[in-house]
Image: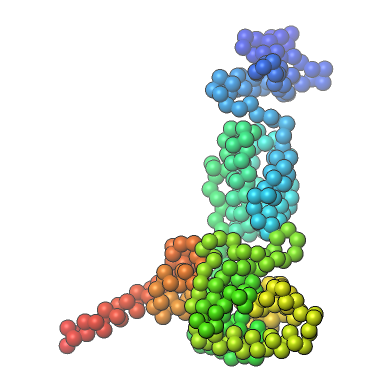
Amino acid sequence: MPKNGKRGNHEGTIMKRTDGRWHGRLTISDGKRKHIYGKTRQEVARRMVEIQHEIDSGLPILDERQTVGQFLEIWIEVAKSQIRGSSWRRYGDYVRVHLVPGLGRIPLAKLTAQHIQLFYARKLNGGLSPTTVHHLHGLLHRALKDAVRMGLIQRNVTEMLRSPRRTTKEMMPLTQEQAAHFLDVVQGNRFEALYVLALTTGMREGELLGLRWQDVDLENATCSVRMNVQEPERGFVLAETKTAYSRRSITLSRLGVAALRRHKMRQEEERAALGAAWRTSLDLIFPNTLGGLMIPDNLVKRSFKPLIVKAGFYPEMRFHDLRHTAATLLLSRGVNVKVVSEMLGHADISITLRIYAHVIPNMQQVAADVVDSMFAARDE
């Protein structure tokens, strides 16, 4: 290595700074210069050779000064106009609470798979759930994919890693007897009809709270799922369901129709008692006491959880388990899985089969019993 600090062949200009570091300067295109700094001359020279190779290969020249944190802060702000408010707020929390503190200081161009792997391990060891780490991986993969597209980095290093396995919350579906008992417990409750629909249609909590009277046809026993109570950036709103699969028509049971008729009579009495204070514009079937949006968390805390305790069920049971109960009971009684999938608003029948695989053996037994009944005479 030359002691005078002058450049060697094909190295560009390399000089030693007064602070002891080495500074490389390379002309890349249109007179633009790329500056490289390092502790040793070899380090700078090696990086300059890499950059020259990138130029010869037509690869983008990376800005090594931008950090992962700086990129993610910009990326999440741009993403605000591209995703739903509730998703954007969750992504923002992932960026600010986890990704920026954990990876933010690393230069974006120098981020490696090992950096990310160590970040995941520390999060898991720190008590973060595998599901949350799985979501962090998905968000980081999406952000770095955009960084590649914009020429900020050459490759998406998350593709070199396996996504952490997400944990699945244990379902607590009710048996047929327990479901019948729950309907007895909720009888006369202000939200009795909501619980009846939850157990007989498998609708989601937000879909039930977003139902309007114009969405149901009691004479023809049908219900159209079109709206959903969602949580965007601030507060809750009534908005269209997220996907085309969620928008669906469901045939109501006689039990559901009867519950809705009783509910409508009680609601008309509420409206008459409140007069002008009732919010008529939303026309919700299951509003709060003033006719406005019923917040999902409030429904669970003030209504569902007390009823679960009163019924003697596990306090850990979630409202979503009513949906699981509806699907499990229907499938176990031999209802076609395609029909159940459409009722639930799943995008594909494979989703229904994957979630309710535990019910499939019972369905096969039903099929075997049907075959036996068809050819019973041959055994005589």
Q: Is residue 135 left or right of residue 281?
A: left
The answer to which of 133 and 127 lies nearer the viewer is 133
Q: How is the image coloured?
A: rainbow
How far from the left and from the top, in percent, is residue 353? 44, 66
Residue 368, can we see it?
yes
Q: Is residue 354 left or right of residue 122?
A: left
Vertical relation: 312 (above or below) 351? below
Q: Quadrant of residue 143?
A: top right
Quadrant containing the N terminus in the rendered view: top right
x 71%, y 9%: residue: 6
How far from the left and from the top, in percent, is residue 129? 63, 59
x 51%, y 78%: residue: 222
Residue 1, can we see it?
no
x 55%, y 72%: residue: 224
The answer to which of 332 and 244 lies nearer the viewer is 244
Q: Quadrant of residue 93?
A: bottom right
Q: Is residue 351 left or right of residue 79?
A: left
x 65%, y 64%: residue: 239
Q: Quadrant of residue 367?
A: bottom left
| Farthest residue, direction right | 18
**Labels in figure, total:** 0
Quadrant containing the C terminus in the rendered view: bottom left
How far from the left and from the top, in percent, is residue 57? 54, 22
How far from the left and from the top, in percent, is residue 270? 73, 86
